Structures are given as C-alpha cells and as structure tokens.
Amino acid sequence: MALYSEKVMDHFHNPRNVGVIENADGVGEVGNAKCGDIMKIYLKIENNIIVDVKFETFGCGSAIASSSMATELIKGKPVSEALTLTNKAVAEALDGLPAHKLHCSVLAEEAIKKALQNYYEKNGIEYDETQFPNHTACHGCDC
Ligand code: FES
C-alpha cells in the first residue's frame, strides 16, 4: 500500500483555500516545537457562519494536506460545528495518514481552534476555555 492516500496527494499538490484573509475575524497560528512546522488559519465569520477560510502552512506535505482538508471541512459551517472538528476527522477525510504523520493533522485542529478563540476574544464573546487546548503542548512529533 502506498504511504499516502490519493486524497493526501491531491490536497498536497492542489491545496484548497491557500492564502490570507485581510481583516480576518479570527486568526490562529500554531507551531510544532519539534519539527518547526507552522500553520496559520484565517477566518471570515458572518452571523456565526464561517463564510471564508484561508491558510498558510510552512511545513511537511501532511501538514499542507491536513490544512487544506480542514479548511474544506469547516467552510460554510457554523462556528459551533467548526469547534468540534478533530484531527481524527481530518485524517479520516484524507483516507488516513501514516501513524507517524498523525501529529500533522493535530496542527490543523489546533490552528482552527486558536483562530476561533481569537474570534471570540476580538468580539468579546464569552467562551468555555476548556474547549481550547494548550497550544504549547507537543503532540508527539517524532520528526
Ligand atoms: Fe511536523 Fe508534519 S507537522 S512533520
């Protein structure tokens, strides 16, 4: 079996939603301390719906494919739904990632959560802090 699924290769070679949103309503940046990869997510939110999302990822192919898929999964969705997106769902939507690359999808989940947290803070919306991970934690990157 090939190391990467066709979907991973597709999203790596033709990533969706690459770029920057000027005046974004929420921005989240996370990095993996061990491999040094960085992911930044920009959200445009209207009436609690994510009407646009863009990303910039400086990292491995799996991180790029994960960002691309994650943005596709939350585009057009309510904020509450985007908050429940897990790295597992991103990896599943990509038809799987090799075990040693699962942490790359964690970066996507965290970047989205951080952007949503930023949106809440910018707009003075109260939120439950326990819904958000500690972004300084390392997620077992073995690269
Ligand atoms: Fe570090 Fe993929 S995010 S190797």
Image (cartoon, rainbow, N blue to C red):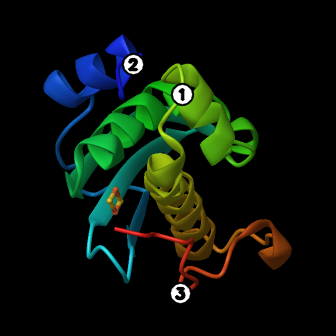
Q: Earlier in the sequence, mark 3 or mark 1?
A: 1
Identify the residue under disc 2.
Answer: 5
Cα–Cα gap, marks 2 and 1: 7 Å
**The N terminus, quarter of image:** top left
Locate residue 94, reporting x and y percent.
48, 23
Q: Nearer the viewer, residue 104 or 130?
A: 104
* Badge nearest the viewer, 2 or 3: 2
Query: Dot 3: what SS?
Result: loop
Identify the residue under disc 1.
Answer: 96
Q: Residue at x 56, y 79 (%)?
A: 135
Q: Residue at x 30, y 73 (%)?
A: 35
Locate residue 122, reporting x and y percent.
52, 73
Cα–Cα gap, marks 3 and 1: 25 Å
**The C terminus, quarter of image:** bottom left
- Above or below, 46 relative to 77: below
Query: Dot 2: what SS?
Result: loop
The reply to whether callout 3 and callout 1 are in contact (CB within 8 Å) is no
Identify the residue under disc 3.
Answer: 136
Q: Nearer the viewer, residue 101 or 126?
A: 101
- Above or below, 42 relative to 5: below
Residue sitting at the far front: 1
Q: Which mark is residue 80?
A: none
* Badge nearest the viewer, 3 or 1: 1
Q: What type is the residue that disc 2 sits on? A: Ser
Query: Dot 1: what SS?
Result: loop
Say if disc 2 is inside 8 Å of ligand 1.
no
Say if disc 1 is inside 8 Å of ligand 1.
no
Q: Earlier in the sequence, mark 2 or mark 1?
A: 2
Locate residue 138, reporting x and y percent.
53, 80
Q: As drawn, is 84 to the left or to the right of 97?
A: right
Of the four image quadrants, the one with ligand 1 is: bottom left
